[in-house]
Amino acid sequence: MTKNFYCLEDDVNDLKFLIASKVRMNIIISLHSGPKKFNELNQITGIASTTIAHSLKEMEMKKWIYRKGNISYLTPTGKIIALNLIKLMKKFDTFKQQSIFWKNHKLDAIPENLQKNIDNLRETFLVEATLDNLDKPFTNYLNLLSDANKMNAVLSICFSGHTDAIHNILIKGCHVKLIVAEDIFKQFIWQFDPSIIKNFIEKGNLEIWISSELLEINCVVSDTFICIGLFQENGVYDNSRLLMGHHRDSLDWGNELFEYYKKNSNLMDTKTIKIQ
Amino acid sequence: MKHLFDLYGNVQEDLKFMVKSKIRLQIMLCLVDGPKTSKEIKNYHGLSFPAIFSNMKRLIEEDLVQKVDGTFMLSSFGRIKLYSIFNFYNAIKVSNNFPDLFLNHDIGGVPDFLMEEIGVFFDSNMVESSRADIYKIHNNFKILLKDSNEIFGVSPISHPDYMDIFQDLLHNDVKACLVLTDDIIKKTLDTVGFENMRVLMENKNLKIRRYPGDLNIAFTVTNNFMSLGFFGDDGVYDQSKDLISKKSAAIEWTKKLFDYYYQKSEEVEIDILVQIMASQS
């Protein structure tokens, strides 16, 4: 990505031309929903006619807009710009809504392709620990997990409360797929009874994938919710904040993250567990 | 539409903050490769210390940059925001670089979720036919196709040359999966012959899928290149312009586009082929 990065500083004019102008942004947004008559643009945006006329002319010169009589349309180029602009706005809205979560946390564990679609997490909500309930994020998560029929999880940490919860949903017949690093797997095995793990794997209810790389994100996706936990920039896991959501786009995003890490992991078979 | 105005209202200051000051942008871009001291930033861009410090203060306040052990580094938050701006910049760049490909063309064949990733083509090429070489696209495509061992295509158009190339490739164990309209399936049967098609399909080297209705896009993606063409506003396929790339991001993008059409199409088994052949007589 960096190869083309430095063009940005010399070629920032189009970005400024659009993003820094409320008038042009409003016109592009208005035309994105369909062609508009001049007076419609005037009414919708509440911007003075002369200002609109001037901006339309500027964007016509850039070939983002064309006019037929009194009606303004987005050109195909204008449509591409409008779509990408809305995507950008949604990403920034995602950052803004949960800014405490995104700030001061490590985000390198989110692959580039999923960072590009971070707006899929726009409908999520943040659950934070409070002074009178430090365990609130984890408790809320456990409540959601207890009803899960399916669990795809990238786990960078392991503790007995969570291991017990996984055990409980496995007993209820939930299908669980876990991606963990080697050290976490060892701890998991130690907390769980290896023969029980083996049993669940043989029944086809449990898959454990061992990641060859260090995992710096926790992401659990069920059939109904997603839950994400991050590490702080200083390397400490932040157990006082979890991002949760139920929207289909967020769940798809989480499953894509799971698939990304699965590609670099090896499926644990029951023979290997015996050796551990 | 109101929700989009509200959305813009909510993020406009944050967006402006990222692009309005060239100095802030220069500082962030200079930190992409790693932490730097203020002296290194000064040398990098020739900025004055007062300009660096006043802007750095704002960047730190916004949690986009962190000061660690006397150096300045882009925070994860700063990096993801900068990359988002950069992705948008690439989309504008693609639109500006290939105006003739998009303007006066029907781009409706690319779904929105992939239009939002059009920036992957920032370093692609548009091959254009000229008076001196009206078959430039066609010949270029044939050369690229011959080096492929896995071909995925969506096409509402046909050319006799392609049939020959495809037959050669398929006999040499190249795998192909093509999403075609009924018209093109019939045309292919006419040219290649039912028996040849049957052998190719039974060998599993060729999979034909039937797209219900009209296609307004033509593209091919293989293991080593992608090629994409649009119809003009007049409804005629524009043979004079083709977007070509050998870059992995562009190939991945086109594979996603293929998946999109794959999901909307159905596999043609031999018995369906017989029906299609019978329907033409």
Image: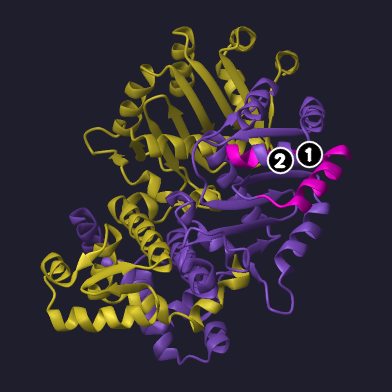
Q: Tell me what hue chain A is rendered in.
A: yellow
State yes or no: residue B167 in magenta: yes
Q: Is mark 1 on a helix, strand or loop?
A: helix
Magenta segment: B158-185
Distance between the Cα atoms at labels 2 and 1?
A: 6 Å
Q: Is residue A66 above or below residue B256?
A: below
Labelled pair 2, 1 in contact (Cβ < 8 Å):
yes
Q: Nearer the viewer, residue B174 or B71?
A: B174
What's the residue type where badge 2 is placed? Thr
Which of the numbered marks, if any, corresponds to residue B188? 2
Give the residue pinned by disc 1: B192
x and y percent of residue B263 in the render?
Answer: 53, 34
Position of residue A213 in the picture relative to residue B44 (left or right): right
Q: Tell me what hue chain B is rendered in.
A: purple
Q: What element carries label 2?
A: helix
Q: Can residue B270 be seen in this view?
A: yes
Position of residue B169 in the picture relative to residue B212 (left or right): right
What's the residue type where badge 1 is placed? Val
